[in-house]
Image (spheres, rainbow, N blue to C red):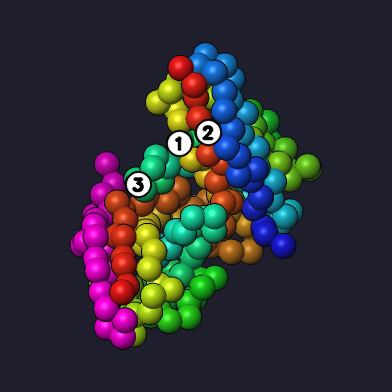
Amino acid sequence: DVKVTQSSRYLVKRTGEKVFLECVQDMDHENMFWYRQDPGLGLRLIYFSYDVKMKEKGDIPEGYSVSREKKERFSLILESASTNQTSMYLCASSFTHGRGNSYNSPLHFGNGTRLTVT
Amino acid sequence: QKEVEQNSGPLSVPEGAIASLNCTYSDRGSQSFFWYRQYSGKSPELIMFIYSNGDKEDGRFTAQLNKASQYVSLLIRDSQPSDSATYLCAVLSGSARQLTFGSGTQLTVLP
């Protein structure tokens, strides 16, 4: 079974702090993603990565950055946390099979990190 | 305009009934379609995926895809109270490599 592990289940941080959310997957997946989930807004993509040292912006990248130094690890960084970044953060991974992008494997999600910024 | 639309519900069905969850998408080039189930406080888990027009069955679950109508649905037969959850539709468009999620439909199965 694919395992996607997020380092923290709950985090409480103060406004202005730099926050690191870590995610590790054990299935050698090429693709890794960071989403946030808020009531009524669903899952929104923050950043994703197709390979080591690669990153691409998702739908809501403002206020966030990411790092992928190793294939299995994808970190989300809040440079200066703000209260509107209070949310559930979900990491996911997948692999790409077949030619092109048409047949990405389904996403496998971690258990999520509930971040509260006060 | 949202790219993936779902009726947010809540949808309530009695135990043993068929629950029908619907999803429409805007990108005609979309290739892959996924249904995830999310229990309260938990992360989404994959239920079904479908790539081709028609029906795909897995146990009590049937996914239906109609690319001409840009419509994908999930049927849950013999609904159980344990099926009560939020169901997320996700679409992989032809031009992107990431999934776009609908906002989810909350399903309640009443004993």
Residue A85 is situated, as x and y percent measured from the top left of the image, at 40, 72
Check disc 3 and report the residue beneath it.
B41
- Residue at position x 27%, y 63% from top? A23
Across and down, in percent, residue B51 comes to: 60, 41
Is residue A22 left or right of A99 when viewed as pictured? left
Q: Tell me where the magenta segment starts and ends, as one range.
A: A1-30
Tell me if mark 3 has few (under 14), some (14-19) or many (20+) residues whose alpha carbon lies within 10 angstroms of its own: few
Which residue is outermost to the front?
A: A118
Question: Which residue is the extreme one toward the right?
Answer: B68
Q: What residue type is labelled 3?
A: Gly
Q: Does the magenta stretch include residue A27?
A: yes
Q: Distance between the residues labelled 2 and 3?
A: 15 Å
Name the kind of residue labelled 2 in the image: Leu
The reply to the same-chain question for discs 1 and 3 is yes
Question: Which quarter of the figure is the N terminus of chain A placed in?
Answer: top left
Q: Which of B87 and A15 is in front in this view?
A: A15
Circle 1 sits on which residue? B85
Mark drawn on residue B107:
2
A82 lies above or below B10: below
**Is there CB contact under 8 Å for labels 2 and 1?**
yes
Marks 2 and 1 share the same chain: yes
Residue A6 placement, left or right of A34: left
Toward the viewer: A6 or A48? A6
The answer to whether residue A106 shows anywhere in this view is: yes
- Report helix, strand or loop for mark 1: strand
| Element at label 2 | strand
Q: Nearer the viewer, residue A27 or B39?
A: B39
Q: Is residue B88 left or right of residue A52?
A: right
Furthest-left residue in view?
A7
Q: Which chain carries label 3?
A: B
* Mark seen at residue A56: none
